[in-house]
Image (tube, rainbow, N blue to C red):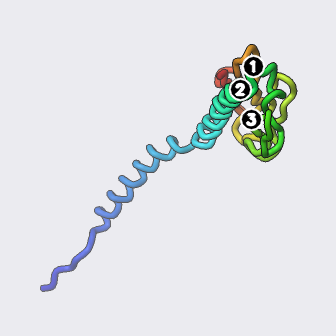
Amino acid sequence: MTTQKGFTLIELAVVIAIIAILAAVALPRFGDTTAKAEESLIRDLKAQLASAAAIYTAEQAATPNDFASFVSDTTTAASPKTIAIGGFGKANACTTKASTITCNATAFSKWNNVSYTFTNGIVTGTATPTGGNSQKNKLNF
């Protein structure tokens, strides 16, 4: 009598069930990664703008009055501009007007109304998520 080697149908079904349970638990954790990545990018620009204002202050020996003093809307910055936002988000999606930088709806897929404000040397910002309860999940940074 010969013995057969291999797995039974029940053993295979148990393995498939375990894999399905693991997938059901893991997949929801990855569903929000784009929004989290874009949130990090939005917050990162705030830090870059604050650093650019500090660099401007050091180089010009004067505090900038507004974003227009130290921010370039193009993809390159020439003195006295210390940061370029032309390539931020999607190309040319953000514009500078005096003390406000506004990023239009094409800049990010998961965030609308992204804006940065420069007041008394301090950079602040807000962003609203697309869809859902926008006031509950609004970013203030």
Q: CA distance from mark 2 to mark 3?
A: 8 Å
- Label located before the other in sequence (1 or 3): 1
Identify the residue position indicated by label 1 in the image: 63
Above or below — where is 44 with respect to 9?
above
Q: CA distance from mark 2 to mark 1?
A: 8 Å
At x 81%, y 41%, the residue is: 93
Badge 2: few (under 14), some or many (20 or more) residues near its Cα, within 10 Å? many
Q: Is residue 90 left or right of residue 6?
A: right
Q: Residue 44 versus residue 122: which sits nearer the camera?
A: 122
Judged left or right of residue 67, residue 38 is: left
Q: Are marks 2 and 3 in contact (CB under 8 Å)?
A: yes
Q: In which quarter of the view is residue 32 placed?
A: top right
Q: Identify the residue under disc 3.
A: 82
Label 3 is placed on what type of residue?
Thr
Q: Dot 1: few (<14), some (14–19), or many (≥20) neighbours within 10 Å?
A: some
In the image, what residue occupies the spot 87% across and 27% down? 97
**Depth check, front residue: 16 or 90:** 90
What residue is disc 2 on? 53
Q: Nearer the viewer, residue 117 or 31?
A: 117
Residue type at numbered disc 2: Ala
Which residue, as the protein is rendered here, is positioned at the far bottom?
Answer: 1
